[in-house]
Amino acid sequence: MEIHEYFTHVDWLVVFGYLGLTTWVGHAMRGKQGTIKDFFLGGRSMPWQAVSGSIIATEISGVTFIGVPGTLFALHGDFTYLQWAVGSIIARMMIARYFVRVYYEQEIYSPYDYMGLKLGLSVKTLATIFFTIGSILAQSVRVLVAAIPLKVVTGMPLWVCIVVIGLFAIGWTLMGGMRTVIWTDVMQFALFALGGVIALMWLIGGIDGGWSAMMETADNFGRTRILNPEFGLGADLKFTLWVALFAVPFQNLGVFGVDQLAAQRMFCCRNARAAGKAILFSSFGQLVTLLMLLIGTALFVDSHQEGFGDQELATVFGASMENVQDIRDSATFAEHPETGEKSKVIVPQAVTVSSGETFSGTSDYIFPIWIVLALPVGLSGLILAGVFAAAISSLDSILAALSQTTLSLFYHPERGEISLSERQLMARSRLLVVGWGLALTGFTLLLAIAREDIPILPLAFGMTTYTVGPLLAIFLCAMIGRGSFRGLLAGSLISFVAVMFVQTDIWVLLIKAKLISAEALATLFTYELNTAGSGVKSVFCFAWMWPLTCLITLGAGLWIPSRKKA
């Protein structure tokens, strides 16, 4: 049987039943929708608890739900990712203390409105363009990454998964603007947590020796390490305590304080005090990450005790059943770090079998496969509904944010200079939701086609490295009340070039197009040839670019003067 044949009609009924229930709740909680303040700010009447849950649901996307367990399951997976929670919490405290206050000084709709009021419309346009480009790529890829395993375990064509996600996202956003987005996000958060707890308890119940045996086995294989105090700038030193303390706060200040995707939720609270509580208490979302890491640990130990089945192996490596034994013979197994004892766990990687075929395995399918094969009918449908819901949550959130920033770019409601009626503004807002929804769904479909030939996924995920630092710097200049457009533009361009020589995404595209050779790039001190010799890998950890690009843009914005008027 193929994996998707285990996903029954009852599971489908549960999935669409849950989506139907969420739609009904979103409709019931939509409130009045007579003005753009109602549509984009929820009338500034949302309880901070709901806003906090919505921030968590947006942060914990389908990529997290699927990818974090797979990350721990991979060859050198451990708990060091949790160190980043320290930097994240530091950033949220600073946002609650300093950022939220300025957002409530007057009625604005986005951080870019605030930047425009303080530094001029040119700066607002620059910040909005940065946000738009980064969001289109990053959120489209999150939908795609969630849709791929859904296609594997449900049997639906990939394009159908993407279109279903897109249609629900457009519908939920149109139904009640940010009020519906926030309340449906709260339901997604509840399902994440419930589904994760059920999965973890079920896994522990199937492990010989229970919790203690799980943690002991994981510790024996080096999977429980949390702290990594090693200091360095190397690309392999991404999850260290120093990165968590000094680089991650810059990234999280940008993502939660300046990026409209998260900031728009804070604007929906009744006042600055409530908004501060919402962002502070969203720190509890780190517990969901811990939960998903524990699920990855349990999956590793369960597979260590039981071994991979043929069906699991075929799905993980994208191979036919006739190649399973060859893969089993050729694959790398997890090893004990001290004794060298091999586990029954096969580490997903590129495997060449006796016939000469090469199969690239992925640990991202581990959790969805287990959900379908191990859980009872109906329960597997409920948890996979959470994956659908997470993808929809990512998309409807960005639809609201993109629609608001686009509207504000043309009409500037924060300046009170609008000649249109509220009814006309609402009509344009809804058209923008539909337009952006279709555009993002279409772009995700293009990514689905291109992913086989063009490594577009690293490009999309890497976009935040290009934009987070400059956006944060522009906001800091606005808080100071000083900064020139020329300087901020120059700093942003310098930052972009600097990131280009640490990230590999754009170069990979140019190498594939034969516009540059990997050997030529490897002569630069920031790159070296990869193991296969067909591409390059970065020598430096990209996370340090968050503070560096922020400081470069901030310095240029404050130092380079505005053009003098004749």
Image (cartoon, rainbow, N blue to C red):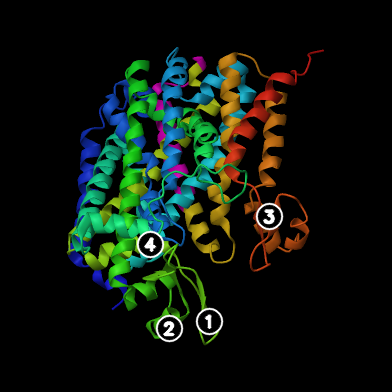
Quadrant of residue 479 within the rendered picture: top right
Q: Which residue carries the number 4 mark?
A: 149
Q: Which residue carries the number 1 mark?
A: 357
Q: CA distance from mark 4 to mark 2?
A: 21 Å
The count of marks equals 4
- Residue drawn at x 27%, y 58% is 214
Mark 1 or mark 2: which comes first in sequence? 2
- Residue drawn at x 46%, y 58% is 76
Q: CA distance from mark 4 to mark 1?
A: 23 Å
Q: Which residue carries the number 3 mark?
A: 507
Residue 415 seen from this side: yes
Q: Give whichever of 165, 439 is nearer the camera.
A: 165
Rate crowding at label 1 as few (under 14), some (14 to 19) or many (20 or more) other CA atoms within 10 Å: few
At label 1, which amino acid type do we have?
Glu
Q: CA distance from mark 1 to mark 2?
A: 9 Å
Is residue 432 rendered magenta in the image? yes
